[in-house]
Image (tube, coloured by chain):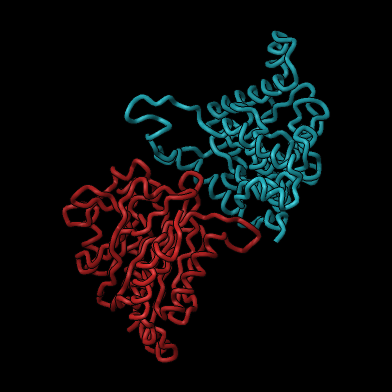
Chain colours: A red, B cyan
């Protein structure tokens, strides 16, 4: 099966949900004109990233009663859409979330499980930690979603792989940092390296959508990309500029790559689980902690 | 990799990010224009090049503000930048405004006089900001910001600091790549607050040494002992780190005494972008 993926590498306006919704609609219209099957928006695409005390003002639930989500849910009747937003749950906890919308419904909601709270990041101050990593079925096959810091850790993509995800959708708002003599920022080099590593090691498609623009002194570098199960980059958006990156991918490539390289078939999950259980049980016995 | 090599930057990438930053941060708060003080030195020259590229030269007002003892080279070098960029310009000598103040306190030393001059220039720039409708662009680099080699509420007063994360030796790389005139690139850095003043004489170390050491201490998170193990004299490392710490007040907003449940500066947290 071939599907056409669109990466909406946008510059959201901080905490201005109506303006950002307009931009989403604009990109949805452009993507429809390009026969896109699935359009991916970056992390916190409806709200902007460094919200601080504005978190509580922009939070929403992905339901028809929400006037902004109504527009997006209606649009998802024609094209699948992944949108990033602040999710407030019934108990009034706030999450960084991405919703996969299709056929007018929320097919899957992922709540960010790793909240970076170090260096320039302060997410743990404002947000609750998501507590679940699950693959989900779409009309194109089984997918998984992760948000930014989630895929700086190796276990979430590994779990999605074992849970059946053949396509990993990675959304980020990655602040550019690490200027040196290299051709890209160090943060871009790191993320592109792990995108290719996951695609190669899991023989999966890895779809990464990263935002652009500035928030106060932070820059966001874009460079959204799609990597195929052979670890080859098949689409790459521009750095620092808004763009709609459109690329058709061939899911039959999974068959060809995994015929050649049966890493999934040979993965020793039972051994992994046994050893992990042993390591966790023995942690206090074998390591002194201070 | 040696530290000098780690201070090398991709100048095209730096220019792209900083030009975009200036354009975005000026326009998102409703401005189209910028005001910038041109001293004739490399920091303000580079900042003017970046700002002109971001906003268009017609939207940049470069202001020269010489004092009676300012070097003649400062004026001619600043003029070279104005001519090369085609920005609008204004010259406001500060002598008639600061001289009466100096006469009122005849025992003022060079440091106090230098601070008054820096703050007089700030007054002129912020007045031009109101008159011309332009945002004041700062010209502080990372080396001087860390060392506190600046006048608080004087030359460090600005709306944005485009080159505030570039060490002096990185400023030189970017300035050269963007075509800043050679006479500006090659002259010894000076605040030009008194005759014969140079940064390196006053600070006591060269920028090459300072930047390599600061890179280790700040960017690479070396501790003092580790920096000494890398070959820096202990006295220099301790002296530089003491300066960084002693001048931290210049890098923070004035401290608010907390009394209520929600206090500006403590837990009333919004980006400046909130306004945009």
The image quadrant that residue B237 belongs to is top right
Q: Is residue A70 left or right of residue B161?
A: left
The image quadrant that residue B126 belongs to is top right
Figure check: B147 above or below B212: above
Identified at 48% across, 42% down, the residue is B27
From this viewpoint, is residue B175 visible? no
Number of marks in picture = 0
> Where in the figure is residue A122, as x and y percent of width and height?
41, 47
> Where in the figure is residue B144, as x and y percent of width and height?
67, 38
Identified at 41% across, 78% down, the residue is A202
Identified at 31% across, 60% down, the residue is A98
From this viewpoint, is residue A287 visible? yes
The image quadrant that residue B266 belongs to is top left
In this view, the residue in front, A235 or A126, is: A126
Identified at 43% across, 66% down, the residue is A286
Figure check: B48 above or below B255: below
Q: Which residue lies furthest to the front in this view?
A: A285
> Where in the figure is residue B79, as x and y percent of width and height?
74, 36
The quadrant of the picture occupied by the N terminus of chain A is: bottom left
Q: Is residue A79 left or right of residue B61?
A: left
> Where in the figure is residue A188, as x and y percent of width and height?
52, 62
């Amino acid at each position: 099966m071939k599907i056409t993926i669109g990466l909406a590498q946008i510059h959201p306006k901080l905490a201005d949900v109506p303006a950002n919704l307009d931009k989403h609609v604009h990109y949805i219209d452009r993507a429809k004109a390009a026969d896109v099957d699935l359009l991916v928006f970056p992390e916190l695409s409806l709200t902007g990233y460094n919200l601080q005390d504005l978190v509580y003002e922009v939070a929403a639930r992905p339901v028809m009663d929400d006037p902004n989500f109504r527009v997006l849910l209606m649009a998802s009747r024609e094209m699948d859409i992944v949108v990033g937003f602040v999710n407030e749950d019934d108990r009034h906890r706030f999450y960084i979330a991405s919703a996969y919308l299709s056929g007018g419904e929320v097919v899957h909601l992922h709540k960010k499980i790793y909240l970076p709270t170090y260096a320039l990041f302060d997410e743990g101050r404002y947000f609750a930690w998501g507590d679940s990593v699950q693959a989900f079925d779409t009309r194109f096959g089984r997918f998984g979603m992760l948000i930014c810091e989630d895929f700086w850790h190796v276990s979430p993509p590994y779990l999605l792989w074992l849970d059946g995800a053949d396509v990993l959708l990675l959304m980020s708002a990655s602040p550019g940092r690490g200027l040196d003599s290299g051709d890209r920022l160090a943060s871009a080099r790191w993320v592109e390296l792990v995108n290719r590593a996951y695609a190669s090691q899991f023989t999966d498609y890895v779809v990464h959508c990263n935002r652009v623009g500035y928030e106060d002194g932070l820059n966001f570098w874009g460079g959204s990309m799609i990597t195929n199960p052979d670890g080859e980059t098949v689409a790459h958006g521009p750095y620092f500029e808004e763009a709609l990156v459109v690329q058709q991918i061939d899911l039959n490539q999974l068959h060809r790559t995994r015929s050649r390289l049966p890493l999934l078939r040979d993965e020793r999950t039972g051994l992994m689980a046994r050893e992990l259980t042993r390591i966790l049980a023995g942690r206090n016995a074998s390591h002194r902690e201070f | 990799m040696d530290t000098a090599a780690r201070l090398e930057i991709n100048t095209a990438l730096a220019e792209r990010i900083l030009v975009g930053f200036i354009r975005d941060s000026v326009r998102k708060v409703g401005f189209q224009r910028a005001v910038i003080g041109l001293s004739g030195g490399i920091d303000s020259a580079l900042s003017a090049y970046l700002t002109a590229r971001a906003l268009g030269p017609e939207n940049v007002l470069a202001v020269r503000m010489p004092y009676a003892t300012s070097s003649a080279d400062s004026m001619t070098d600043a003029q070279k930048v104005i001519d090369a960029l085609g920005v609008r310009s204004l010259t406001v000598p500060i002598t008639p405004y600061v001289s009466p103040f100096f006469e009122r306190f005849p025992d003022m030393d060079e440091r106090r006089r230098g601070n008054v001059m820096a703050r007089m220039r700030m007054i002129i720039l912020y007045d031009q900001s109101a008159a011309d409708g332009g945002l004041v662009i700062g010209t502080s680099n990372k080396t001087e910001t860390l060392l506190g080699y600046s006048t608080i509420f004087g030359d460090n007063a600005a709306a944005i600091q485009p080159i505030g994360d570039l060490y002096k030796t990185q400023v030189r790389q970017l300035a050269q790549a963007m075509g800043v005139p050679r006479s500006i690139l090659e002259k010894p850095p000076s605040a030009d607050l008194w005759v014969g003043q140079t940064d390196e004489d006053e600070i006591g170390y060269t920028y090459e040494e300072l930047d390599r050491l600061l890179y280790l201490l700040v960017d690479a998170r070396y501790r003092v002992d580790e920096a000494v193990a890398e070959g820096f004299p202990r006295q220099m490392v301790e002296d530089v780190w003491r300066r960084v710490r002693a001048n931290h007040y210049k890098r923070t907003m004035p401290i608010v005494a907390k009394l209520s449940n929600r206090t500006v500066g403590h837990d009333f947290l919004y980006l400046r972008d909130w306004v945009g």
